Amino acid sequence: MNPHLTRAFRTAFEELAETAPTPVGLAQAALVSARRQRVTRLAVGGGFAAAICAALIGVVAVVAPISGTAGDQFADNGLRPLVVTAYSGIRDPTIDDPSPHFQYSLLLNAKTGRYDRVPYRYAMPSPDGSQVLVATGDNSLRYPTRAGVLDRASGNVRWIADFGSTSDAHFPGYSSDGRWSPDGQRILFTHMPRTGTPGFVLVDSETLTTTFVPLPDLAAQNDQVTGLIWTPDSNGLALTLSKSVDEPTVTGIRFYDLAGRVVRTVPASGGPLDDVSFFPDGGQLALAPYSDGVRQTSVTVVDPVTGAVQHSFKVPLSGGLIGWTDDRHLLIRVFHDQGGIPASDQPAPVLGPGDDEYDRLLVVDLTGRVTHSMHLPAEYAEHLFIGFSAGLPSSAAKITF
């Protein structure tokens, strides 16, 4: 989800919880107005192991492999290289309360090739897949935000210590959801309190100790209110610079070291940074505007050192950038209710059986040509996390790409 929308929703739920019961009709209204502005995100794996307060999670429900009509999209010889390892932030339709606290996530079980339901609104697998960064709550008095690490083998969750004595500067309540560093050694939170100095929080992967680094200029030239992301070497952070005229416009990218010092600023345009923007070797950076559900998806690939444009193309439907599959292909998530989804190797939308019922994950080359497509489950997830399919049973072939 767009960090600005995330913060707005959490503030609204906090104020509702403090003053009155949640209006029953708010759920559908909120979902309808925000759905097309949600931004999906990627992380290839994760890695982490230690904590403070231990707690055992509840019963994990096994969910059948995702169904759909995309069987012909897969190679006959088995698994494709990538798979969605987690669908995170799914609303439970049986609960009227629209609070994010009641969202759940689906984690891929590598042994069964099926997805396990877990009671966390946020779930991001670690780079090695053995741990999962999880979060609960909506930053209200009723459901305070907590962040922790789930051990996949034992089912234990160890919670990260919070800090901040005031209700408007609490961590992790006034922070973005965490992000694993590419090397799995740290977790990053962008901290934007209502009062006080903004900055970022680094959590050590071995001890779960937290370090707050102030960044007084975090909101300067950041009209889109985007968060920090990791650089591929895990030794730095990057921030989108933007200004608002008629609408927010990206103007550049500012790089920081882990002490909060500015390393360099490069000009850039095309869209805000996301956790998925960097190609893993650091040589390319993909930028795409937040999806509005109407305009075509415009993607710009730039040199992260100079800001020079390397590629620029459009996908014929509105969607969100999910990440890279290799140095020549990107993943785009497109919504199902736009009158048709591009089929593989088709340059324009073609309506096929079932295409009006599912979102799709598209693999596109750097000219915008769709080379592969896959149905996503009917339940809308705010975040998608991607990993490698090696080790999955052959029965999971239809969920690989």
Image (spheres, rainbow, N blue to C red):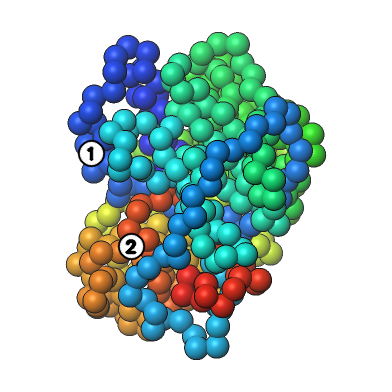
Residue 328 spot, x, y in % from top left: 55, 75
Mark 2 burial class by Cα count in 10 Å: few <14, some 14-19, many 20+: many
Q: Is residue 302 visible?
A: no
Say which amino acid is labelled 1: Gln
Taking the image as shown, residue 172 lies to the left or right of residue 317, namely: right
Residue 28 marker: 1
Do we see residue 391 in this rendering? yes
Front-lying residue, 46 or 268: 46
Task: Kindly identify the residue that appears in the image at 48 percent across and 19 percent down.
Answer: 194
Residue that appears at 58% across and 55% down: 43
Name the side, left or right, on which 75 lies relative to 343. Answer: right
Q: Identify which residue, 72 or 366, lies in the foreground.
A: 72
**Residue shown at the point (51%, 62%) measured from the top left:** 114
Residue 364 in the image, given as x and y percentages of width and height? 44, 74
Describe the element under mark 2 as helix, strand or loop.
loop
Image quarter in which the N terminus is found: top left
Residue 349 image-quadrant placement: bottom left
What residue is disc 2 on?
A: 359
Q: Residue at x 62, y 64 (%)?
A: 111
Q: Earlier in the sequence, mark 2 or mark 1?
A: 1
Task: Identify residue type, mark 2.
Answer: Asp
Asked whether the beta carbons under mark 2 and mark 1 sit within 8 Å of each other, the answer is no
The answer to whether 334 is drawn above or below residue 293 in the figure is below
**Dot 1: element:** helix
Where residue 261 sits: x, y (%)?
A: 71, 35
Q: Is residue 111 above or below residue 95?
A: below
| Depicted 400 relative to depicted 46: above or below | below
Mark 2 and mark 1: Cα distance apart in space: 19 Å
**Callout 1 environment at 10 Å: few (<14), some (14 to 19), or many (20+)?**
few
The image shows residue 176 at horizontal and vertical percentages of: 53, 35
Q: Residue furthest front?
A: 59
